[in-house]
Image: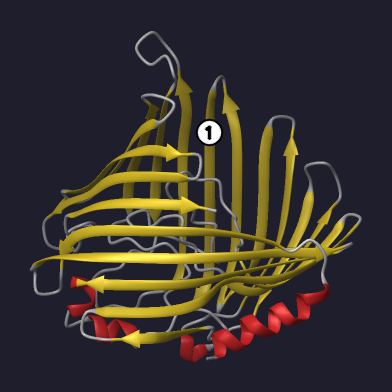
Amino acid sequence: MRCVLFVLSFLLIANHAQGIELSGHDSNVLFQHKNSLNQNVTTDLNRLRLTFDGGENAWQWRLSYDHELLYGGAVRDPSFALRQQIPDPTLLDLNANIVTSPVLDWRHDLYRGWLQYKKDDWSVVVGRQRIAWGSGRIWNPTDRFNPVQPTALELDQKLGVDAAYMMYDYADFGSIQMVIAPGQTNRSVSRKWAIRWQDTIEQTDMALWLGEVGEERVLAVDVTGNIGDIAARLEWQQSWHGLQGNFGQFIAGMDGTWINQLFSEGLYLAAEYFYNGLPNSNDKGFVQLDRLQSRSHQLLGMLAGYDVTPLWRTELVWLLDLEKTSMFIEPSVRWSVSDNMDATVFAQLPTGSGGAEFSALNDLFAIKVEYYF
């Protein structure tokens, strides 16, 4: 009910705005996996997202409203009810269940809802938004607002943060940014603030930010440059005085596209090393949702992608635990059915003994269809 009231209030406030545009995205993922009882089950996840954009003069706004239906084995899993009791790590409670049954879970929520004021070189955004920091291709340790694990089922789904975001553009590529995000203890949301500088010096993109995440004091650096035709990336963040002590995380990576007689359309390759100074020792320990998680200190990741034809693309994600025998492989093939429809077949294939990085994951096979309008 709170979600519906918020959406209606937002639309009423924007009722007099000019140029309101409606767009949408329907996504359906059918996947086979194992439940908590180690049984093979099939689940269907369908999400309809409606996005309203509008504004007038210096004011702009966006509202993205989701309806999500989960049907099948994941809902029947004995652990599902327990997981549903855990609130989303957002300041505002803007989601609710419409229907809950032994085989179906239907919920709606606000994915994005923000208001922006932009004047000359200044802009302010208030509401639920995506704070997109970090240049890494697989891991982003400097993203302490919306971190996503590379083994997630839907990597493009970023929960968002309820925050105020301010930016001053002092040059064509230079800016000063500030984020303030209040906390909510009973929803596992840490209070956060950060001030970030970003600029391009010659051919190198650089960013530096400092701030606080809960009790942590954080300093982070993000650098991207070119070595010949290859892009080199470095992200590093160091935290002090947190509940789990001091720790650091960083990535170093390179990526580029190679064109030759064998790969005339260009083969994209990326390699990335991730170091985590505060790995999780076990699944029952404290899990901090606003930082990247891993069981091992050192991981290596590789990406590959190639357009077989203008309509068909194949990709591969390969992650390796450098401390224990464990790996994660995700091959995929995407078909552009039409200008506004894509179909993807993919699998997630983890291996590893007990306690290794990917040992807690199970095989997953999926078909995803996306329609845009």
Q: Residue at x 11, y 57 (%)?
A: 353
Q: Residue at x 53, y 86 (%)?
A: 93
Residue 153 locus on image (x, y percent)? 33, 58
Q: In the rendered image of this protein, does residue 205 appear above or below residue 276?
A: above
Q: In the rendered image of this protein, does residue 295 appear above or below residue 216?
A: above
Q: In the rendered image of this protein, does residue 155 appear above or below residue 201?
A: below
- Say which of 114 and 319 sits in front: 114
Which residue in the protein does label 1 denote? 232
Lateral position of residue 370 relative to residue 25, left or right: left
The image quadrant that residue 226 belongs to is top right
Res. 153 in view: no
The image quadrant that residue 32 belongs to is bottom left
- Say which of 246 and 103 sits in front: 103
Mark 1: few/some/many CA within 10 Å (<14, 14-19, 20+): many
Residue 255 locus on image (x, y percent)? 47, 31
Lateral position of residue 278 relative to residue 82, left or right: right
Residue 229 locus on image (x, y percent)? 55, 21
Lateral position of residue 47 relative to residue 295, left or right: right
- Say which of 150 and 356 sits in front: 150
Lateral position of residue 194 relative to residue 4, left or right: right
Residue at far right of view: 120
What's under tag 1, amino acid-wise?
Answer: Ala
